[in-house]
Amino acid sequence: MKFSARAQAIAPFLAMEFGKRAAALEAAGHNVIQLNIGEPDFGAPPAVLREAQKVAGDTRLTYTAALGLPALREAIAGFYARAHGVQVDPARVVVTAGASAALLLVTAALVDPGDEVLVGDPSYPCNRQFLAGFGADVRLVPTDASTRFQLESRLLREHWSDRTRGVMIATPSNPTGTSAPPAELQAMCAFARAKDAWRVVDEIYLDLADADAQGRAAQSVLAFDDEAVVVNSFSKYFGMTGWRLGWCVVPPQMVPVVERLAQNYFICASTLAQHAALACFTPESIEVCEQRRAEFAQRRLLVLQGLREAGLDVPVEPDGAFYVYIDVSSTGLDAMGFCERALAEAHVALTPGNDFGLHRAGRHVRLSYAASREQLHEGLQRLASFVRALRREGRAA
């Protein structure tokens, strides 16, 4: 059997690969602290679970429209107004089978083979895999601590070419947990718009971002670029990873294009998940999610302190999501070696930076603090002991 060049070119998703290794160790009887996957330990809000149980008893769970339940599209639009002060026409909201499906639809709608697309390095690997899968020439733009591992308008100007057709930005970012400053995001969008290029902004972690100095919620790109394409998800802020439900907000002229693609690629997102997700936007659920956001902020402090005590460097402290991007070069190991040995010897699962790009990826490791405080405490203690052993090993050599 001959497989496509596309299938053969795609690299393994290392976060999942290390998850498989961790599962094998657990099956062998070891206690493994899994800090490799960005999966909140809370699960869906209680009101969502109650609604799912209620709806599951209805045998009429037929297909919804390809764009999603009208009531859910309206609820998402209302959330933008309440949480971010942005007016969004519900007709522009497309409900999808997870943010991955949203990215797939958006990429299919915008990318032709040979189109150059600028993406920051490091960045979430699946985003660029979607682009490459539809024939894009993905140009990874190196970023570093000086830009908080984010793209900025200066970098777009430096790397833009006559073939560039679009830019994909994630803020807050996976793997670094850092956000693009609003003024810089606005400048990037203005630059790309002047070039008649599309802007896709991954806001999956937007509602887990820190408030600004005035206590205002993080700003959506839609506040200043109404034609940007936004991708979001119920997985992170609402804790609904396994429900596979997301959405995108697209310009009006793009709605019928995405609708045709959705009809052919997916039919619709899960009807059960869509009905249950209506309960995400109740005051009860929002209060629960805000409490969880505050808990993540406390976990971040715990992790940063633990990493400092372990002698591990965090070049830029995160301001959103639930990730820390660690420079492990001082240990004498590269990222893959560090993660492999941390799992084998300390039974702590992390994700090597090799997952997220090329630029200095081999010296960075991602830690997810979506695990419980108890797991984080134990994992950090194990990592500190592991690093001390590495340093003794290095001195002995």
Image (cartoon, helix red, strand yellow):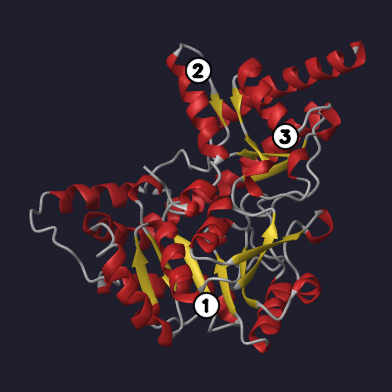
The kind of secondary structure element at disc 3 is helix
Given residues 206 and 157, the one toward you in this image is: 157
Which residue type does callout 1 highlight? Gly
Callout 2: helix, strand or loop? helix
Whether residue 236 appears in this view of the structure is no
Picture quarter containing residue 188? bottom right
> Quadrant of the image for the N terminus?
top left
Is residue 106 something that shows in the picture? Answer: yes
Disc 3 + disc 1, Cβ < 8 Å: no
Query: Is the C-beta separation of discs 3 and 2 under 8 Å?
Result: no
x, y (%) of residue 377?
A: 63, 26
Where residue 211 sits: x, y (%)? 64, 62
Q: Earlier in the sequence, mark 3 or mark 1?
A: 1
Residue at 42% in and 87% down: 253
Are dots 1 and 2 in contact, CB under 8 Å?
Answer: no
- How far across and down, in percent of the image, does residue 313 sit? 81, 38
- The residue tagged 1 is 85
In three-dimensional space, the C-alpha distance between marks 1 and 2, rounded to whole angstroms, equals 47 Å
Q: Secondary structure at mark 1?
A: loop
Q: Position of residue 196 (x, y in %)?
A: 62, 87
Q: Earlier in the sequence, mark 3 or mark 2?
A: 2
Return the residue at label 3. Answer: 335
- Residue labelled with disc 2: 25
On screen, 122 above or below 31? below
Q: CA distance from mark 3 to mark 1?
A: 41 Å
Q: Is residue 182 left or right of residue 59?
A: right
**Amino acid carrying mark 3 in the image:** Ala
